[in-house]
Amino acid sequence: MKTMEQIGAELRATNEDNGWFNLDFNESNGNTIGSLLMEVVYEVCNMLEAYRNNNPDHFKRHRRILGHRINKLDNDYKESWKIETKARDVVQHLLLSISEHGEAYEAWLVKDKKLFDEEIADIFIRLLSDQVKQHDIQVTKEIEAKHETNKGRGIRHGNKRV
């Protein structure tokens, strides 16, 4: 059986052959559409964590920040749209991974099991190809270590909401 690292290397090679990684991955520009959208996603994730931790004050804080992020997106997207990115930076790769989650959600909404399964596979492909291989993450080792950590965390990590 292949390891996750081996699968990631094969996925990366295929994506390189298909022209997805022919530029400097580490070049980054914080004013891209990807960066602006990721700021919105980040605040939504913080709101979810505040809810899970039963912390309405943090939820309201991140909701307020989300409003500012959306206003920034409304104000800056026209200029950001013009920026020709020369590379897919870390933010863009993370956002592309999240977009696969959105596509899986759409498939789930229409009860298309085959498409849902394909989109879940796309999530793993994005993670293994875009992140794991690019950053030389020893994912099998990291998953095993995280699993050991989680075993000692107790029920719902301090009674977080599901």
Image (cartoon, grey):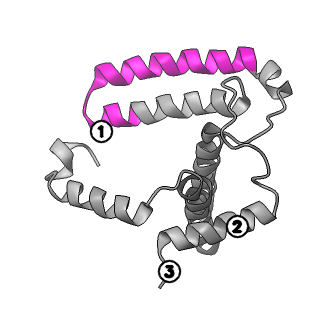
Residue 150 place in picture, x, y as percent: 22, 55
Give the camera-side residue of 27 and 62.
27
In three-dimensional space, the C-alpha distance between marks 1 and 2, rounded to whole angstroms, equals 39 Å
The disc placed on residue 7 is: none
Up/down of 125 relative to 134, above or below: below
Pointer 2 local density, CA inside 10 Å: few below 14, some 14–19, many at least 20: some
Residue 143 place in picture, x, y as percent: 35, 61
Residue 108 appearing in the image: no
Identified at 17% across, 44% down, the residue is 159
Tell me which numbered mark, 2 or 3, is placed earlier along the sequence.
Answer: 3
Identified at 73% across, 68% down, the residue is 14
Circle 2: element type: helix
**Residue assigned mark 2:** 13
**Mark 1 vs mark 2: in front:** 2
Identified at 62% across, 75% down, the residue is 114
Give the camera-side residue of 17 and 75.
17
User: Magenta region: which residues?
Assistant: 47-76
Residue 52 covered by magenta stretch: yes
Q: Name which residue type carries label 3.
A: Lys
Up/down of 41 relative to 93, above or below: above
